Amino acid sequence: MKKFYQNGVIITDGKEIRDMGILTEDGKILDLIPSAPADAEIVELHGNYILPGLIELHCHGGDGAEFIDGTEESILRACRLHADHGTRVLYPTISATDYDTMVRALEALEACRDRMPLEIPGAHLEGPYLAPEMCGAQDTAVIRLPNPQEYEALVERFGSLIARWSYAPERDTDGKFLAFLKKKGITPATAHSSAEYSHMKEALAGGNRLVTHLYSCTSTITRHGGFRHLGVIESAFLMDDIYVETIADGCHLPPELLRMIVKIKGVDRVCLVTDAIRFGGLTAGEVGGSVPYVIEDGVAKLADRSAFAGSIATADMLIERTVRAGFSLPDTVRMMTETPATLMGLSTKGHIARGYDADFTVLDRDLKSVAVG
C-alpha cells in the first residue's frame, strides 16, 4: 500500500523542504513529490516536522529499566519509552560488568530484538576494558584488562548481535583486541580512557575512529617532566577522521562547549546521544535503592547533589536542547540521523530520499515527538 505524507516540513540533508510530500510503499521511500497520487493513503502531518528516523548510538535504558537487567520485560520497557520519544534505531548499551551478566543481557536481547517497537541493529558493550581512574559511573570492581578468552567467547556466541564495543585503547597494549574487533566487523570506540596522543594515533590507524561521550571520562592534556601530551579530547579534535559522541542533554555539556565541539569537528563528525540510564524519561522526584538519586534540572543527580548520576534524556529532548543551544534544526537533525548512519554503515538510514527506509520521526513545533499514520 502506498502512503503519502503531506503538509509537513521535511528536514533532511541539512535543509528544510516545505513544498513536497513523501510517497512510500512497503517501508521504502518512492519519491518526494508535490501532491498525492490517486492510489495512495494520505497521512496528514498538520504542519509538523518530519525527519529521518532518529538514531540512538548510546542508551542504557529508561522508564525504570536498563538493558543490563537481562530481562525481556526491561528491554521492551526501555525501548518503548525511547520509541515514544522519537528514536527509531537504537543500540542498547550494556555497562561494564562481569562475564555472566553480559551473557544474560545479550541472551535476553537476542531473544526479543525482533519484537521491539524500534530497530535494534546490535548491542553496544561499554567496557569492561576501561581505565579504572576514568571509571565515572562504571563499577571499578568489574573493570579489567582485555581478556582474549572472554571477548572471543562472547563474539563467538553473540557475534551477529554485538555491533560496537567501547574500551580504553591504552589498556589494549598489544593492539590485539582492536584487531579482533575490526576482523569481526564490530565498531570500536574509545571510552573511559586516559589515552594520550600516541595511543589515539595507533588506535585510529587500527580502525578505531569514534570517541564515546567526549568530555565525560576522556583524558585531556597532561605533563611528563614538563612536556605536554595530548589526551583523548585534543586528539579527537586534531584527527579529522575521528567521530565523537556528545551527551547533548543541556546538562553534561554546557551550550558553549557543545558549540565549540561542533565548530571544530563539524556536524558530519558529531553524533548526539542520550546515554540515558534507567531513569530516562523521568522528569522529577527522588529515586531510592542502594544509592539514592534525585531527578531535577533535566538530569539525575546524587541525592546530595554533589555530582551527576546519569542522563535522563530522550531523543526529542536532545533535538530541543541542541536547537536551544544555538544550532539550526537541520544541522541538529543531521547529528542524530545522517552522521550516525554513516558512522555505523546504515546505508538505508539517515536521509529522506528515494530508496531509503520510510522510517520517520515526527516532531511538533515544540520539538516533541508525536505519532502519525
Image (tube, helix red, strand yellow):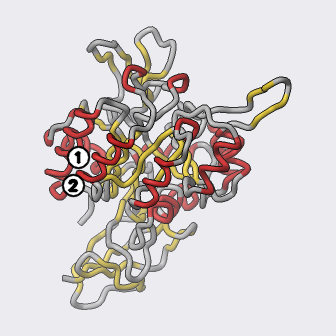
Q: Position of residue 116 (x, y in %)?
A: 19, 53
What number of labels is visible? 2
The mark nearer the N terminus, 2 or 1, is 1
At x 74%, y 28%, the residue is 222
Q: Residue under label 1, please give it.
A: 80
Q: Which mark is residue 117?
A: 2
Q: Position of residue 328 (x, y in %)?
A: 60, 56
Q: Which mark is residue 334?
A: none
Query: Viewed as shown, does residue 104 lie left or right of 326?
Result: left
Image: 187 above or below 166: below
Q: Nearer the viewer, residue 277 or 39?
A: 277
Mark 2 burial class by Cα count in 10 Å: few <14, some 14-19, many 20+? some
Amino acid marked by disc 2:
Pro
SS at mark 1 in the image: helix
SS at mark 2 in the image: loop
Q: Nearer the viewer, residue 171 or 373?
A: 171
Query: Viewed as shown, does residue 207 lie left or right of 72?
Result: right
Give the image quarter of residue 105: top left
The extreme top residue here reads: 304
Query: Viewed as shown, does residue 320 lie left or right of 91?
Result: right
At x 60%, y 43%, the residue is 325
At x 37%, y 62%, the residue is 53
